[in-house]
Amino acid sequence: MRSAKQFLTYVSSGPFQYAVAEALALPDTYFDAFRADMLAKRDLLAAGLAEAGFSVFSPAGTYFVTTDIRPLGESDGFAFCRALPERAGVVAIPNAVFYDHKDAGAPYVRFAFCKRTEVLTDATERLRKAFAH
């Protein structure tokens, strides 16, 4: 047990070291293009969510866009996210799952933008149809 704990605690990402070494060998142009692609996808999703009526918090360092659902007349992120697939054919994650005090995160939900551009375009159109007045 002691040996297993030693290797799991201090070398838990050991298998990923090979992947990191490969990534570090990639040219800077790869990362420049990746960053530009993620920024474009973030902006596409954030604009679509804003057009649908969500209050949008544009992130600086993740691939999730957090929104406030209160402008849509909603306040329960769990109920909102459970109904969203049927209502708009889109899924979101209630931010309250990340809060110690669930009520503080209740009106916030997040959407991932690490998707193909066509998926994001379709999702934003579905959300506009479902929520825009």
Image (cartoon, grey):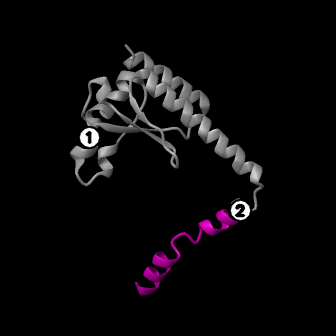
**Going by the image, does 96 lie left or right of 36?**
left
Pointer 2: what residue? 24
Graded by Cα atoms within 10 Å as few (under 14), some (14 to 19) or many (20 or more), the crowding at tag 1 reads: many
Q: Is 71 colored magenta in this rendering? A: no
Residue found 43% across the figure and 16% down from its top:
129
Q: What secondary structure is marked by label 1?
A: loop
Pointer 1: what residue? 106
Out of 5 and 36, give the one closest to the viewer: 36
Residue found 41% across the figure and 86% down from its top:
2
Location of residue 25 in the rendering, given as x and y in whole percent from the top left corner: 75, 62
Residue found 55% across the figure and 41% down from its top:
114
Is the residue 39 above or below the residue 25 in the image?
above
Residue furthest to the top: 133
What type is the residue that disc 2 sits on? Answer: Leu
Q: What secondary structure is marked by label 2?
A: helix
Write down the region rendered in magenta: 1-22
**Going by the image, does 37 lie left or right of 58?**
right
Across the whole image, how many numbered discs are drawn on residues?
2
Q: Earlier in the sequence, mark 2 or mark 1?
A: 2
Location of residue 133 in the rendering, given as x and y in whole percent from the top left corner: 37, 13
